Each structure stands twice: as C-alpha cells, then as structure tokens.
Image: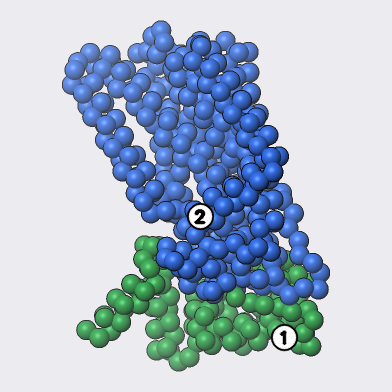
Chain colours: A green, B blue
Amino acid sequence: MLTIDPKSATPPFEQLRLQFIEQVRSGELAAGAKLPTVRRLADDLGLAPNTVARCYRELERDGFIETRGRNGSFVSAQGDATEQQAQVAARAYADRIRSLGVSHDDALAWVTAALRA
Amino acid sequence: MDGTAWFISIVLAVGFVVVFAATFVPGSGRRSTQRLVRSIGIGLPPQLEAEVEARVILRQRAGSIGAAIAVAAAVAFFVLSSAAPSQLTGLLIVGAAFAGIAIGAGVSAATASAATAPGEARVARLRAVSVRDYLAPLELLGARVVAGLAVVTAIAVIALTPFADGDDAANVVVITALGVTAGVSLALFELFSRRIVDRPQPVGTPVELAWDDALRSSTLRDIVTAPLLIGVYTVMYGFIEISDRVGVASDSFVGFAVAAGVFMLVLAALLILAIVSIVSRPQRHVIRRLWPDVDVDGARPDASAGATA
C-alpha cells in the first residue's frame, strides 16, 4: 500500500519513489509484480502523470523496475543472479497458489516443509 | 406470445418497479448494505456507511431500470414481430431481464464519479489489478465457456431446423435469440468489466480501498450473471431441442438416447459447477485475492486490521 500526503514537507515525487523502493526492498512488492499504468496511479493518487512517469523512469534507471514494451512495467528481481532466480521462482509459486485459491498459511506451511525435506 | 409469457413479463415488470420504488424507502439501503457486509465478510466503518449505501442503492436502481427496459423491449419484439408463439418465450424474457440488470449495473458503475477532497492524503496499491482479481475463476471462465457453448448450441439447433415442425419451429427462434443474447451479454461483460477495473480508485484509507474493491466485485458479479445464466438456459433447452431433432433425423431410439445422454451429462456438469461455486463463496474472492491478510472466513471482519494489498 502506498500513501501520498500532499501536506507533507517531502515532495510527492520523493514520497512515491521512497515508498516504492522500501516496498521492493522489504519484499512487499515481489519481483515480477505488474505495476499500474502511469495514468492509473496518477489518478489514484491525485498526482500529475508526469510526476509518476518521472518516478517510473528513475526507478527503471536504478534497476528497481523494468518496462516490457506494451505489457507495462514490472518489479525487477533484486540482488545477485542466485537471489534473482529465487525471487522469480517465488513469484511463480505465489502466482500458482493464488490461482489455486489456496490460503497463505497452507502455502507457507507446504513450502517450509518442502525446504526442510 | 402465449399466456405464460405474458404472465412472466407482467410479474417481472411489477417486480422491478417494486425493487426500484423500494430503494426510496428509508432503511432499504441500510438493509441491502448489511446483506452485502455479511456476504463480503469485512467490517464497514461508520464513516463509510453513507457512501457504500448510496452506491448500493444506485446499483439497485440502475439494475431495475435496465431490467424493466430489457423486459419491455423483449415483449415489444415478440408482439411486433411475426414470430410464432413458443413455450420458451417466457424463458427469453427472463434472460432479457438478466441482461438488463447487467447493462444497468455496468453503466452505473462505469460512469459513476468518484472524488476525494483535494489536499487529503491518498492511498493506492502498487500492483496492477485485473478482472481475475475481482471474479472467482469459476464465474469468469464459467461465463465465457457457457456463453460460447450457448452460441454453438443455438447454431446446432438452427442447423437441425429442417427436422422441426409446429411448436419446435417456434422454439428455434427463441433458442437462437437466447444464444445471441448470451453472446451479446458476454461481449458487454468483457467491455464493462475492463472499463470498471481500469477506473481510478481515489481513496484516502485502506478500508475505503477495500470497500471500493468489494463494490466493484459485487457489480462485476451482477454483470457476469447474465452471460452465465442465459448461457445455461440456452444450453439446457437447446440440448432438449437437439435430442428431439436427432431422434427425428435418425429415426431411431439410439440417436435420441445418445442426445439425451449428452444432455444429462451437461446438466450434471452444470449442477456440480453450481454447487462448487456456492460452496466456495465467490463473493469473498476479491478480499481473499487483494486483501489476503484480512480474515474474511474467520471471526475478524476488519479490513483495517490487515490491509496490506
């Protein structure tokens, strides 16, 4: 979840960028997650589209997100090659669990058991 | 139109006028909202009650107006056209009512204005959403598959027209119209669903966002019901007609038995899907999907407690 406070001393662009980076680093935004379009996020947050577009450009330049043509923008895998592969695999597992409608607790229990086996 | 079709039309018209009028009765919006709260499974904070009630009432009014217009249009079609009376005409009028509800709910949701006070803090989710987040797979895929099957069934019924006579020939018109209505309903669903999901969600708190998600999902479920139910009707009654024609065409009991067997299989599959759909509580899919930390199935119906989408 992202919060933009227009009364804050920090400019909206910086609030957006910092919260984005924090969520990617904390894992709340997983690698491979699709981001909303620039216009949609701007409308949701009451920001100018140019502000969001500039933020996306800077995040892409810094390696946090990647743009896949007309498919949109996605969160990039972070860390070294091994960590990136692990994040991609985790994303695939999460997507599959979601499509199966399995609860998060069960999914976590099974992956923990599989790792211990 | 025969007497049964007129009876169904009048009951539906009166019913939708009553539903529309009831939205003006004090307390009706609150009762509808409370039903929604129970079905969705998340708490509704007092400061959001008025807004949610207003949106629920707007959707009910739009749905009942859409249904009344659709029923009137279907009746006018049968009265003004030279279509022969059929025992299935009433079924098409019920199908038209569902399509009307879908169009009314879709138009109201796709054109409703949403605004927050300028200068207030805003929240948004940093993940793109799609129709799959708002509708359970069984409903979404079910509508697409069943509506597609309905169109194929209608084509098969038309192809077997040479073997129809009397009332059977009149049924061809109704089943064809049902197949077309199922296809058009699916097209409208695809159009409305994308427009509704792509609309911005200008909200100030996670709970507001959760409720906006819940209301969107509820509207999409209203819309997807049309292709789903009309498709089921078309497939069921289409297969009855097909089994009759196959029996006549093959002039043997085996042909009839095979067609009847396929019909029973389709009927059993639809029944199983309906039971699975009810048991899986599809109305809570949106919260399970977009608000996974909110315990909708347990005893903690508080969106603000775990809003992390």
* Residue B31: percent from left, percent from top: 59, 47
Residue ID at (38%, 78%)? A89
Q: Quadrant of residue B59?
A: top right
Of marks 2 and 1, the one in the foreground? 2
Query: In this figure, what is the number of numbered marks?
Result: 2
Residue type highlighted by circle 1:
Glu
Figure quadrant of the C terminus of chain B = bottom right
Name, please, the residue furthest toward the front. Answer: B27
* Residue B306: percent from left, percent from top: 52, 74
* Residue A30: percent from left, percent from top: 49, 78
Graded by Cα atoms within 10 Å as few (under 14), some (14 to 19) or many (20 or more), the crowding at tag 1 reads few
**In-front residue for pair B281/B164:** B281
Residue ID at (58%, 20%)? B10
Reply above or below: B167 against B192: above
Q: Determine which residue is flagged by label 2.
A: B38
Q: Is residue B190 left or right of residue B234?
A: right
